[in-house]
Amino acid sequence: MSGRPSPTRRTVLRGAALTPVAGLGLAACSPGGETTDAEPSAPVDLGAESEVTKGSVKLYRDHNVVVSRDANGTLKAYSTICTHALCPINKLEGTKLVCPCHGSEFDATSGEVLHEPATVPLKELPVQAKDGRIVAGPAATA
């Protein structure tokens, strides 16, 4: 036996609580346990421009993006990764996005929080109509 005392249960638990989790925040965790890219890292062709008519909203689950078009025809896009716990939002009710993890709700036309626990709005993404297609993500407007 060494001359050092064994650590107490409290010391071990405190150390475990303070140990950082590897990879935290690098990918979003979906309710099914799989991970997904948080948002487009390059321009992404979402689909035909006609899919988002004036006054409508469309959720592109595969790309974690929601796109809306106001009455004037202006497009807006937001990441659909919840700002509370990084869960991909997969439910659109009218113009309301609902996070499946903890119930946060967001306005799909403005990104604003409608219902907590999230307190930070969704991240706005560049978006444009190009050659009849909707393109969103970094440098989409370049």
Image (cartoon, grey):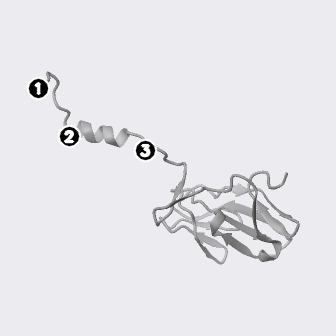
Q: Under tag 3, what secondary structure?
A: loop
Q: Is residue 68 above or below residue 84?
A: below
Task: State which quadrant residue 70 falls in.
Answer: bottom right
Q: Residue 53 got which mark? A: none
Q: Residue 1 got which mark? A: 1
Q: Which mark lies nearer to you, 2 or 1? A: 1
Left or right? Give the position of 86 relative to 54: left
Left or right? Give the position of 53 relative to 114: right
- Do the CB atoms of the residues marked 1 and 3 lie less than 8 Å apart? no
Q: Under tag 2, what secondary structure?
A: helix
- Front residue of 50/96: it is 50
**Label 2 sits on residue:** 9
Tell me residue 3's x, y (percent).
14, 21
Residue at left offset 78%, top offset 74% = 52
Which amino acid type is shown beneath numbered disc 2?
Arg
Q: How far apart are marks 1 and 3 (CA)?
A: 32 Å
Q: Under tag 1, what secondary structure?
A: loop
**Label 3 sits on residue:** 21
